[in-house]
Image (tube, rainbow, N blue to C red):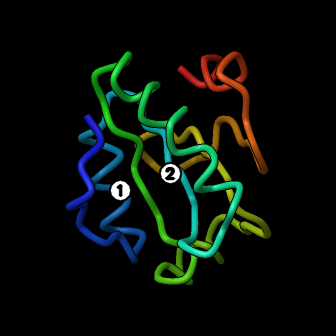
Amino acid sequence: MNDMKQVAITTVEQLKEAVRGSKLKLVRVSASWCGPCRSMQPLVEQFEEENDDNMIYLDADLSPELISHFGIRGVPTILKLDDELNVLMTNVGMISKQKLEEFK
């Protein structure tokens, strides 16, 4: 399921559109320089495959408007959102498969 050719999401409106088209409505905030983010990649890919949906990826360095909007202070961060971008659940830092399953 993981598609590395994702469109860069940098604005609130782009994120709203992506969330509305997503089954899981999960946003993964990461950065290319983040070691824990890279370590989580296999877990994320497995989760996406098992749930037949991709997480929405935000690059912390390319999405300052969204980072500010959500008050994100560290990566990796996973957000569960509703269609209006209200945060329903948050995890900052590494996450276990069991904890990730709670985000469904």
Q: Amino acid at mark 1?
A: Lys
Q: Is residue 68 above or below residue 29?
A: below
Q: Position of residue 95 (x, y in %)?
A: 73, 35
Residue at which label 2 appears: 85
> Left or right: where does residue 54 sit relative to residue 38?
left
Q: Is residue 18 above or below residue 63?
A: above
Q: Is residue 66 above or below residue 102?
A: below
The tag earlier along the polypeptide, 1 or 2, is 1
> Left or right: where does residue 33 sit relative to residue 52?
right
Q: Residue at x 46, y 25 (%)?
A: 47
Q: Residue at x 30, y 37 (%)?
A: 22
Crowding at mark 1 (Cα within 10 Å: few <14, some 14-19, many 20+): some
Rendered image: mark on residue 16: 1
The Cα–Cα distance between marks 1 and 2, rounded to whole angstroms, is 7 Å
**Secondary structure of residue under mark 2:** loop
Q: Quadrant of the N terminus?
A: top left
Label 2 near label 1: C-beta < 8 Å? yes
Q: Position of residue 89 (x, y in %)?
A: 69, 36
Q: Amino acid at mark 2?
A: Leu
Nearest to the observer: residue 55 or residue 15: 55
Q: Position of residue 6 (x, y in %)?
A: 25, 60
Q: Position of residue 49 (x, y in %)?
A: 33, 24
Rendered image: mark on residue 59: none
Q: Quadrant of residue 31?
A: bottom right
Q: Residue at x 77, y 66 (%)?
A: 74
Q: Residue at x 20, y 61 (%)?
A: 5
